[in-house]
Amino acid sequence: MSDHEVEHLAQGLEVLIDLMDVHIGYAGLRDHLIAERPDLVELLRRDKPSRLKARGDWERVMIGGFKGAPLADETKNSRRRTSPDFFGDGTLRFEAIAEIDFDRASALDLIELIDSTLAYLSLQQPERDPGDNVVS
């Protein structure tokens, strides 16, 4: 993949993240479950923030990786020095965290929580125009 293609993908990802930002977190999922599946909302909790605060220039890391995005003082960049406002593994996921009460949740409850979470995220997903550009 060329540098131009990588940069284009990274910019598209950044647009998608900005549009989905308000929806990815415990509060949005909780509100959705209260309306759609109140029986499941009792199985989730989150006392701390479900997302991190961003540090550094994450866009440069998305485009060039940590090695391609040295810090201003020319020291090596790392996840400790630069991070997005979400939990994840490397630069591969956009994730928020909530705890599940495994003492009360059955296997069927877990399946329904996953299904309800995916349905919630699908409802929030922006539409695309025929040119494959995110429009809302």
Image (cartoon, rainbow, N blue to C red):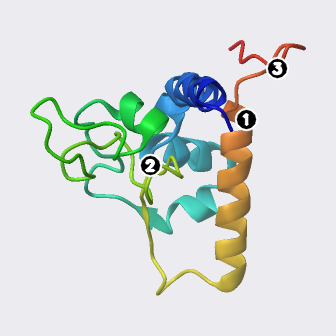
Asked if marks 3 and 1 touch (Cβ < 8 Å), the reply is: no
- Mark 3–mark 1 distance (CA, rounded to whole Å): 18 Å
Residue for badge 1: 123
User: Height in image: 29 above or below 105?
Assistant: above
Residue for badge 3: 132
Asked if marks 3 and 2 touch (Cβ < 8 Å), the reply is: no
Q: Nearer the viewer, mark 3 or mark 1?
A: 3
The quarter of the picture where residue 48 lies is bottom left
User: Height in image: 108 above or below 40?
Assistant: below
Asked if marks 1 and 2 touch (Cβ < 8 Å), the reply is: no
The single residue placed furthest to the right in the displayed view is: 130
Q: Residue at x 51, y 83 (%)?
A: 104
User: Which badge, 1 or 2, comes first in the chain's sequence?
Assistant: 2
Q: Secondary structure at mark 1?
A: helix
Q: Secondary structure at mark 3?
A: loop
Image coordinates for residue 106, horizontal then vertical, percent:
63, 84
On the rendered structure, is 26 left or right of 52? Answer: right
